[in-house]
Amino acid sequence: MQTRKLGSTLIDICAYSEIAGNASAEIKIDEIFFEASSVQSFASEQARTDFRWLWMGRYLIEEPEHAFVALEDGDPEQLCGYLVGSLSDPAPRAEFSSLSYFQSFAAVTPQYPAHLHINIARDKRSQGIGERLIQRFVNHAQSYDSPGLHVVTGAGMRNVAFYQRLGFIERARVAKGGGYAVLLGRELSG
């Protein structure tokens, strides 16, 4: 666990495994996920469940060893952010075939196979928690000798500047829904 003071509060960054199964923490992860989501309305409960599975749930179930959480004062009841990720290249994986942009990014993803999804509670954003979660994941991916990691977002989105400050560079882009999806990659070797 890594601890850092944020104002009068201590923020701990720890492995998801330390809080897995804590009902309050699991509920808070879901609240943060849906609060931060670009999709706020779903055609059905199944559509909502499928959306959660695609962007967060599969990672917590299938690859929980690559997930990290931010806790206020080390308290799982006060979870304020999370990061889920994978060290495997998503482009060739069948479970990501519904994300058509990965076919366009397939030439680049082997250099940046690790990937992540991160969300912070609205009232805790812009306080360095996201940066600390990403640095923890970077250290984790490096310990497995991953050559690089990536995130996919929309060109011009506010989070692009955040990732660029953390060393991510646009490596590819593809037209998507009237705009562009961009793959931002960060080398991890050396």
Image (spheres, rainbow, N blue to C red):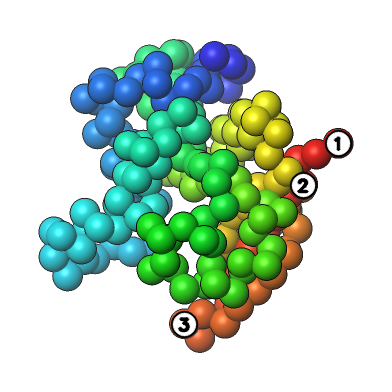
Q: Is residue 97 left or right of residue 126?
A: left
Q: What amino acid type is highlighted by mark number 3?
A: Gly
Marking on residue 187: 2
Marking on residue 190: 1
Instruction: Give the x, y percent position of residue 142.
Output: 70, 32
Q: What amino acid type is highlighted by mark number 2?
A: Glu
Where, by quadrant of the figure, is residue 76 drawn?
top left
**Label 3 vs label 2, nearer the camera:** 2
Q: What amino acid type is highlighted by mark number 1?
A: Gly
Q: Is residue 93 left or right of residue 51?
A: right
Image quarter in which the N terminus is found = top right
Q: Helix or strand or loop: what does disc 3 sit on? A: loop
* Image position of 162 with respect to 46: above or below: above
Check whether the beta carbons of the residues at disc 2 and disc 1 lie within 8 A of each other. Answer: yes
Q: Residue at x 42, y 25 (%)?
A: 16
Q: Residues within 10 Å of mark 2 (few under 14, many from 20)?
A: some
Q: Residues within 10 Å of mark 1 (few under 14, many from 20)?
A: few
Q: CA distance from mark 1 to mark 3?
A: 37 Å
Q: CA distance from mark 2 to mark 1?
A: 8 Å
**Furthest residue to the right?**
190
Residue, disc 3: 177
Q: Residue at x 20, y 63 (%)?
A: 47
